[in-house]
Amino acid sequence: MTKRARTTGRGKISAATTSGGRFAVRPGTFNLAGELFTPEGNRLSRLEEDIREEVAAVLVRDGAEVAFEACGCGGGGQCKPYWPGKAKIKALSRSSLPQMSPRPTAPTWIDVWAGDGTTVVFCHGDITWGSLLP
Ligand SMILES: [Zn+2]
């Protein structure tokens, strides 16, 4: 009869190592735990809600990526986030700001997500940015 020690605090299992379930990696979209992933699979959590267009442009100029979802569900609903190319959006951020529709037909806001050394400006609802948005 061998007494097996249960694993205690040491070597705690991180959610980041889990390959399935609520914390599964879902490149380019959300998992069931509400974490967002870049198309490369970087795990992000929400850093700020409701930033202004000027702040979004500065973040992108400084290297943030951009995601869009047009229906205003927040991104975890029926749509999948759209990820424009990094180089294009960075060039655009030098010459223009994202534009929120003055009469939005969907919930419209911009929030910021970060993790794994990546920052993402996430545009929701009736937002356009130059010619980039669908
Ligand atoms: Zn949506």
Image (cartoon, rainbow, N blue to C red):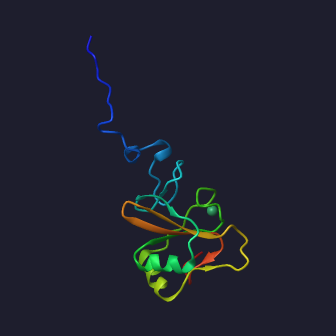
**Residue 94 at x, y percent in the picture:** 46, 86
Vertical relation: 43 (above or below) 127: above
**Residue 8 at x, y percent in the picture:** 33, 31
Instruction: Report the residue that reaches farthest toward the bottom.
Output: 95
Instruction: Report the residue that reaches farthest toward the top.
Output: 1
**Residue 57 at x, y percent in the picture:** 50, 80
**Residue 6 at x, y percent in the picture:** 32, 26
User: Which residue is located at x 48 percent, y 61 percent?
Assistant: 28
Vertical relation: 86 (above or below) 40: below
Vertical relation: 22 (above or below) 71: above
User: Which residue is located at x 30 percent, y 39 percent?
Assistant: 11
As drawn, is 98 to the left or to the right of 45?
right
Ligand 1 falls in quadrant? bottom right
Q: How many marks?
A: 0
Instruction: Report the residue that reaches farthest toward the left.
Output: 2
Depth order, front residue of 68/94: 94
Q: Quadrant of the C terminus?
A: bottom right
User: Which residue is located at x 36 percent, y 40 percent?
Assistant: 13
Q: Quadrant of the N terminus?
A: top left
User: Which residue is located at x 40 percent, y 77 percent?
Assistant: 62
